[in-house]
Image (spheres, coloured by chain):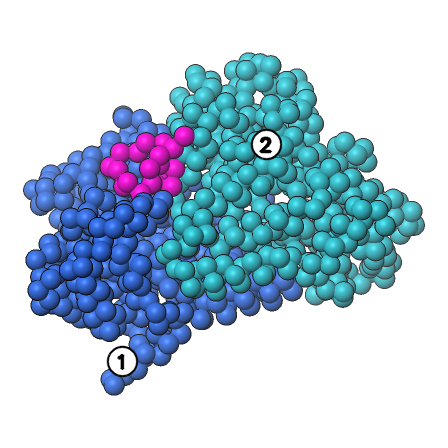
Chain colours: A cyan, B blue
Amino acid sequence: MTNTDEALATIRAGFHLSAQRVYLDGNSLGALHDTVRRHLDTVVSRQWGEDLIAGWNKHDWINLPSTVGDRIAQLIGAGPGEVLCCDNLSINLFKGLAAALELNAPRIRIITEAGHFPTDNYIAGGLANLLGPQRCQVEAVEINTLETLDFSNVAVLSLSHVNFRTGTLRNLPEITARAQAQGALVLWDLAHSAGVIEAELNRHHVDMAVGCTYKFLNAGPGSPGFLYIAKRHQSATNPLPGWMGHADRFAFEPNYRPAPGITRFLTGTQSVIAMAAAQAALSVFETVTIKTLRQQSLALTQYLMDQLANNPVTSGIECLTPGEAQRRGSQVSLRLEHGFPISQALIERGVIVDFREPDIIRFGIAPLYNQRADINIAVTTLADILKSGIYREQRFSQRATVT
Amino acid sequence: MTNTDEALATIRAGFHLSAQRVYLDGNSLGALHDTVRRHLDTVVSRQWGEDLIAGWNKHDWINLPSTVGDRIAQLIGAGPGEVLCCDNLSINLFKGLAAALELNAPRIRIITEAGHFPTDNYIAGGLANLLGPQRCQVEAVEINTLETLDFSNVAVLSLSHVNFRTGTLRNLPEITARAQAQGALVLWDLAHSAGVIEAELNRHHVDMAVGCTYKFLNAGPGSPGFLYIAKRHQSATNPLPGWMGHADRFAFEPNYRPAPGITRFLTGTQSVIAMAAAQAALSVFETVTIKTLRQQSLALTQYLMDQLANNPVTSGIECLTPGEAQRRGSQVSLRLEHGFPISQALIERGVIVDFREPDIIRFGIAPLYNQRADINIAVTTLADILKSGIYREQRFSQRATVT
């Protein structure tokens, strides 16, 4: 084993994963690492249970949004003091877009991708609704029109680094540079790339970014989001100014004075338990580099695509995820007639994938814990299900509320 | 023992409280109940650790904001489907105020209390800043001017049910009726009353309310906030429209369609771990009524004020909290020269209180776990500290970042 293989094997051994199951849904909800479980027990029983109010100072709870944010910064190529872990992605996006409009006044146009994760476009629409058409306009364009789009009157371009449906990785450096060359700001949603792809935000001069910690960062269901604002933009106004972003929180001053730096983008108090889970989940990344994880991810998604192509039963399935490594995120999305019942049959047989309307099955690859053996089982099981036609049984067609 | 005494004794026995310490800061951070610790262990190790993505359906994580919200509703006199547990108080307040302005157009004035908890006023200011002076104006008035204030062009009145500094309980029924009689909407901040005082929101026809769960509801440091919007106002627009408030979350539709009812006021994904802690913490309230807790709270704050008055060393201290039961929250606030070092000396001797600038020591009473014995120790210790003058020692004057 190489040093990398050893480091990954050690990490993998700490995840709570059943031997009876292949988990390929880390792009939706990451797995539990024992480090997280143990740290949560300490935070709940010892820090809160024993130290109570003193915990805010003794355990530095008050600075968790910054300390956890700084750790995320290392994974996405940002500097210290450029990332906060707080709230959720949608709310952080609202803050980022409002700040971008202010910074880039008098421009008022927000451009998004039509195929963006829906909440991103809903939030942009919500901001436009608040500000009114004289101060904000949102336009969702097809991604393939970006190349010829005129950015000369665009305030901010809001895109996903990896498309959630197809797993396509956007060309962040090129798109950022092109939009900025015409004076637009660029905000990236890293939900499906943080923890598996080097975003290198500073290197590519990215203005803003948002993301979540519950996918490849493994911080638990619904764990907090994050917000990156480049140092040069941190004088902007937080549209949701709360006491945690005040220059002197515990002076309880009647008037709002924004804290220096990114701290001003905090609003209310954050869940210490949720933040602690994120802190512990990020500590799992300490022994590997994001570059190593990207290599591992690419090797596994390539292996998955190869195995699908080599199996006569699966070789004809349309793969929405690009074959070129530089355009591929950390998932493989297949378009399949009867996609929903097939996904349910896979889950029943212990291959945990997810389904996205109308006909997409996503195989997420989490390089921290997925291996070739997982992929072998997944492809064999998929072939069995297709060959046997078992997915046509009535019970596989029943929709649950969440997948 | 009466049935009530027995019920409270049983509950009290479940809290993690040290015999070496008197905890009188439940108005800032509630204590850990063993029910919460055990439930969190189950949610982390079993629900997330074993069921992973399936947990969203299997354990109904997806509906926690509503199910926990409905439980809070019972404590504040609201109906099912009128309360969400989500985000934090500041963000919920932003949603409520924006919705109130929309509902009460063309009125644009927000009236708040000058002595309001600061974040409430910062958030109102942030909304005004976004909307501009043609669409929103905020005015913070002294509380004693409310009686003569003309509400005829006020869109919404935003007040605290209990003032965080003085512990004064506002006359919610009377103030609500007076403002509404002139067409204003009324939004109450229940941060310092939820769990200890019957707010009876429906009975008093309150329009909106916000609060937090980390004080008297004991859901842990920084645990989620809540938002009450009366049924009659739920057609309003959520200014932060995210996918969790969409009518069909997992259809991933390009356009936002608000869910019916209060669900539309959700934005992004909530921390399941944080929500689970709130759910368990609220289950502790199942065996007592809020009426009982209010009686217990009043008896204890009265006892504390009596003990202070009866002790020759403490009898001269100015008490900011009203003596009349109907004007008293669940804390006793004393104004003391050298308040800060005295509070630190109390803490060093195991009487956990907190300090608020410039000279206020707060003794919070949590009727679920505080008893007369706590108060006896607190008053005796305070008298000792004052008599001995020990608080004049240098080390008690060093400020921490949070108290």
Up/down of A179 relative to A288, above or below: above
Q: Name the quadrant containing residue A75.
A: top right
- The kind of residue tagged 1 is Asp
Residue bearing the label numbered 2: A78
- The chain under label 1 reads B
Say whether residue A283 is visible. yes
Residue bearing the label numbered 1: B5
Residue at image coords 16%, 38%? B141
Dominant SS in magenta: loop
Q: Give the image location of residue A128, x and y in percent.
A: 44, 30
Residue at image coords 48%, 67%? B37
As measured in the structure, the alpha-carbon distance from the residue carrying label 2 to the one carrying label 1 is 56 Å
- The chain under label 2 reads A
Q: Nearer the viewer, residue A144 or B84?
A: B84
> Is A244 one of the magenta-colored residues?
yes
Residues rendered magenta in the picture: A240-260
